[in-house]
Each structure stands twice: as C-alpha cells, then as structure tokens.
Amino acid sequence: MSFDVTSLIDRYCAVWNEPDAVRRKALLEGVWTERATYTDPRADTVGADELLAHIAKIRASRPGAKIVRTTAVDLHHGVARFGWRVVEADGTPLPEGIDFVELAPDGERIERIIGFFGPMMPI
C-alpha cells in the first residue's frame, strides 16, 4: 500500500481550518515532525508550538476564513508542492499561494514547508 501524499496535505490544511485549539494541536501532531519548520513571508517557525501560535494569530486576524487547496499535489524525491488560497468567511477569495513541502524520511509526515503568497510575477 503506497502512502497518499494528497491525504497528508489535506490533513495539514485541516489544521489551519480547525477552530478548536486542542483539536488543531492533535491534527498537527499527526502530520508534523517534532522539529519541522514553517516559513512564509511573515513567519519562520520551528516545531509545533511555534506553528500553532502563528496559526492562532492568523485565525484571529481572519475569523471564519478557510484555507482551500486549489491544485493537485505534485510530488517527486520527497518534495511536494500545492496551490492554495484563503477564502474569507463571507466567501471572498484572496489571491492564491503555493507551498513547497519537504517530507520526513518516513515519507508520511512533514519536515518543512516554505510558502509563497500570490501568483508568480512575469519578468
């Protein structure tokens, strides 16, 4: 039976969408390694506690907003990428972003995420 990386990414996105902090932590522990890192233009976190604090801050600034995966998950050599967007509580979509995911050696958890906001800009 092969591992389903799309399921892993969807479970990761569910962490961001979970309103209950206790359940959010339990969800993250199922997909995140102990020293995993998350980096985007506004954050650089190490470990679950730092990422959970960042997610709580973002959720507080955008009550009711959801992260929605907008592309298929692409995977090679233990690295995945996927597109996403935030949809505000009233349904307003914000610009898309892209995350690059480095899988842990077990291939079943996340060791690192680097996220970018907005579309790529042409030269």
Image (cartoon, rainbow, N blue to C red):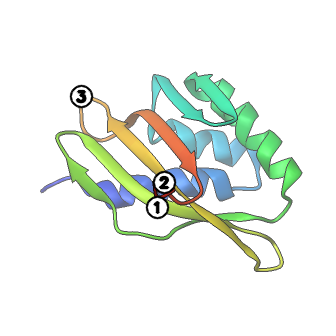
Q: Which one is in front, 22 or 35?
A: 35
| Element under disc 1 | strand
- Label 2 packing within 10 angstroms: few (<14), some (14-19), many (20+): many
- Foreground tag (1 vs 3): 1
> Disc 2 vs disc 3: which is toward the camera?
2
Q: Is residue 52 above or below residue 93?
A: above
Sequence-wise first label, 2 or 1: 1
As drawn, the residue found furthest toward the bottom would be 91
Mark 2 is on which residue type? Answer: Ile
Q: Quick check: marks 1 and 3 in contact, CB under 8 Å?
A: no
Residue depicted at 46% across the width and 37% down the height: 113
Mark 2 and mark 1 in contact? Answer it, CB < 8 Å: yes
Q: Which residue sits at x=56%, y=23%? A: 47
SS category of the residue bearing label 3: loop
Measured along the vertical axis of the image, is residue 2 above or below residue 30? below
Q: Which residue is mark 1?
A: 83
Mark 1 residue type: Gly
Q: How far apart are the two marked residues, 1 and 3, measured between alpha carbons?
A: 23 Å
Image quarter hosting the N terminus:
bottom left
